[in-house]
Amino acid sequence: MDSKLTIYNTLSRTKEEFVPYNPPHVGLYVCGPTVYGDAHLGHARPAITFDLLFRYLTHLGYKVRYVRNITDVGHLENDADEGEDKISKKARLEQLEPMEVAHYYTERYRHAMERLGVLSPSIEPHASGHIIEQIELIRQIFEQGYAYESNGSVYFDVERYNAKYHYGKLSGRVLDEMLACTRDLDGQSDKRSPCDFALWKKASPEHIMRWPSPWSEGFPGWHLECSAMSTKYLGERFDIHGGGMDLMFPHHECEIAQSTAASGHGAAHYWMHNNMITINGQKMGKSLGNFITLDELFTGSHKLLEQPYSPMTIRFFILQAHYRSTLDFSNEALQAAEKGLDRLMKGVATLDKVKPSDRSTVDVADLARRCAEAMNDDLNSPIVISVLFDWVRTINQLYEGQQQITAADLDELKRQVRTFVFDVLGLRDERVAGETDRVTPLVNMLLDVRQQAKANKDWATSDKIRDELTAIGIRVKDRKDGVDWEIE
Ligand code: ZN
């Protein structure tokens, strides 16, 4: 565990050596999706960034408890007819339970993440399943004097908190400045100050998702779930809290205020934030017409897309930039990523064809050393990729006989290449069988040939196709009106 991993801590604004509270255990909390719409490009970056961290910490030998929440409270209103969210509208029109809508999008999110090679977290708690914990946390904040009730809702008293602690320490804001530039309350609000935020909201009559509480029937404020669930599963102090930069204020600032108010100290030691994705230089947004869902990317069905982009192309594209840099999406950039990934995977495949010799002219230890150095430097994945490309050139030279390698060195090289390409970067060779995108048309073509053979009573050919497909794990099932197949 003598890793010398350094990570940029948003809280201290410096790169710090990573020292966990309780090694080899590491607690990692990342804000997950709000499940009332399809996962889009903006979801892919935090998911892949913290998947890289999760994978690398695991690679270093840490036992990571990775908690990523599902926000399924307070967003599904009966009157949320914005015109874009078809399923919410469907929920209302077809009288679905909001939980059916939440479940539907949770499943779709998980499926999209799986395709992107994002590993499942250790725990994926739902906000709706932790109402009791959230109410309990509000009680603690009340006990410490940092909450007040107003017409059935409960608010966090930011000014009172700021008198003792610093509200704004994560985002580098100062309360007086925030107050000066915030418009006055319109008289409609139950809040004492415009900077106060809700811990509990009394539900309006049309709000479907509601729970009983000591203050009113209502629902918890959004910031509360992350404080309550991270404490429940990782303890009052844990190692790393992550999320997108867009969540730094107010969400993460409020999380810090809540846990500090309740326990006297902040919960997470390191705060990590990934930068945003822009599209052709613009911020992504529904109103700008550049809002691209992951499904649209995978199928190419958005007007801004010149072609479909495979999940691994998206992953590679994201890993080619450091997580704290901005990343601009464009067809050219995605096409370049597609070519780069192809070159890398071909290099990995060529390694299997290299013949060992009785001496080595290459320094195999170089790959692991440089990749580890780059990862230890605040997860510098673009450098890891450039080291791997250096080695693709070397692998080609080994294959061409311009360089030599011993059998033992070759084994070590294969092990290191696979470790960094597949385990740490989490890439997958989409060209090999098992990726249904490419297998499906091939299998369908073979089954067409087989149907033709059967029609011609050429049983030998028909059986040969079925048997050979079975041999590679593709089971063919004849039906009366056609044929089904599945990968076993
Ligand atoms: Zn959160």
Image: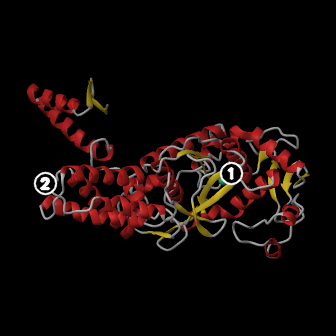
x, y (%) of residue 168?
A: 75, 67
**Residue 243 placement: quadrant:** bottom right
Of mark 2 and mark 1, the one earlier in the sequence is 1
Nearer to us: label 2 or label 1 = 2
Q: Give the residue type at disc 1.
A: Ala
Q: Is residue 63 visible?
A: yes
x, y (%) of residue 251?
A: 70, 59
Q: Residue 253 versus residue 395: which sits nearer the camera?
A: 395
In which quadrant of the rendered image does the C terminus lie? top left
The vertical placement of 330 against 41, above or below, is: below
Label 2 near ligand 1 (CB < 8 Å): no
**Which residue corresponds to mark 2?**
357
Q: Residue 278 versus residue 337: which sits nearer the camera?
A: 337
Q: Is residue 24 left or right of residue 205?
A: left
Q: Which mark is residue 112?
A: none
Dot 2, how many residues are within 10 Å of its Cα: few (below 14), some (14-19), or many (20+)? some
Counting the numbered discs, the total is: 2
**Which residue corresponds to mark 1?**
80
Q: Is residue 178 left or right of residue 143?
A: left
- Residue at 14%, 34% in the rendered image: 452
Q: Is residue 387 left or right of residue 72?
A: left
x, y (%) of residue 200?
A: 81, 49
Q: Is residue 325 left or right of residue 423?
A: right
Quote the CA–CA distance across marks 2 and 1. Answer: 68 Å
